[in-house]
Amino acid sequence: MLLTVAVLGLCSFVRAEQSVQSVVEMLQDDDESVAQKAEATLVQMGPQAVTPLRKVLNDANFKVRRRAAEVLGRLGPQAKRAAPDLVPLLADPQFEVHEAAEKALVQMGEAAIPALTDALKTQTEGLRKVVLETLSRCGPKSIPILLDLLKKDDSSFIRASAAEALGGMQPAAPETVQGLIAALLDLQEDVRGAAVDSLGQLGTASLPAVGQLFSISQTDKDSLVRKKAGDALIRLGRLTKESGESVAVLFESLLKNEDKVVRESAIQALSMLGMAGLPGLIQALSDQDNTLSDEAAKAIIQLGPDAIPALQTLQQSPYPYLSRKASDLIKRIQKKTRKKEESN
């Protein structure tokens, strides 16, 4: 009796394998609607479809490779055994296959991390970059791996790629911010630049980096990195109106920068800080570039009557130009206020 049951079970298993295989073969059909029905059926079959699908991931027909990857992606973590087979497809010459493989690995989430981590051992920088970008989308468990690459990898290209990938992982973990701050000391400007960009993208989580960003905006030997640091400070300033007073001090310091673009960025940032930015905007009225001085004036007018007391103090300036400028701004604010009241 037991032998009969075993034989029947084996026969059922063989029939099931044959059934899955026949559906997998339908992925070769030129008719997209037929192939889509096959994909849907394979998804319904679940884990038993994984092994046959793995076998066709290297099929000569790119449509079969793409369709198999799509099914494995829809199976998600159930298909984690296929992750090592999907990784090579990240370098597939057919973009849609590459895209389907990347999406499938991301859909597997943390289950794909071991295969992707192993793939980072390859010597091909291009593939390593794609792998780490995919890894960064597989969940927070990938953060320690990316931080290790950022800190230790021999390739500056990979360190920069790791920094870039970390900037897209939000909400930011404290260790991510600390790792990016440490990368600001990297000897390669592309790594420092990528770390600066990512800190700017991580929002208020990057506030612990404000001091370092300011220092870089002033002293980094690479002009592009200095500019990026200034831009990152601007973005942080826009997100931190409530703590504007402390951030405003940094932007006021940027007003002394020799680079007109940096000073312009500082004025724009100060204008986003409300009254906390007023002292810096008043300072910018003395800018040697008339365009920037005018920009600061416009920002002060936008603050309305609240700016008048500070302007009245400026009227007492020993410098006639500033005294006249203050008087003119007070008149323009009062005129604007009257118009607004009349329209109401």
Image (tube, helix red, strand yellow):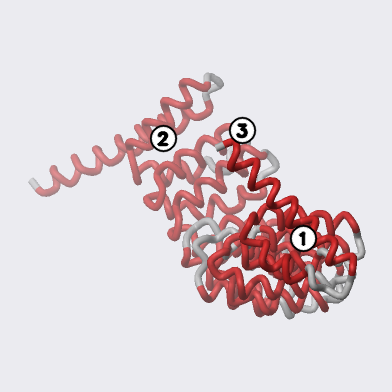
Q: In the rendered structure, are the residues bearing label 1 and label 3 in contact, judged by CB atoms less than 8 Å apart?
A: no
| For marks 1 and 2 on the same chain, the one whose residue lies earlier in the sequence | 2
Q: Residues within 10 Å of mark 3 (few under 14, many from 20)?
A: few
Task: Count all numbered tags in the image, as a single digit.
Answer: 3
Q: What residue is rendered at 41% in x and 45% in y?
A: 50
Question: Is 218 left, or right, of 123 in this rendering?
Answer: right
Residue at (62, 44) in percent of width and height: 98
Spatial CA distance of label 1 from label 3 is 52 Å
* Quarter residue 156 falls in: bottom right
User: Pointer 1: what residue?
Assistant: 265
Which one is in front, 39 or 214? 214
What amino acid is found at the position of numbered circle 1 in the picture? Ser
- Helix, strand or loop at label 3? It is loop
Depth check, mark 2 against mark 3: the one in front is: 3
* Whether residue 311 is situated above or below residue 32 in the rendered picture: below
Of mark 2 and mark 3, the one earlier in the sequence is 2
Kindly identify the amino acid type of the residue bearing the numbered disc 2: Gln
Q: Nearer the viewer, residue 13 or 257?
A: 257
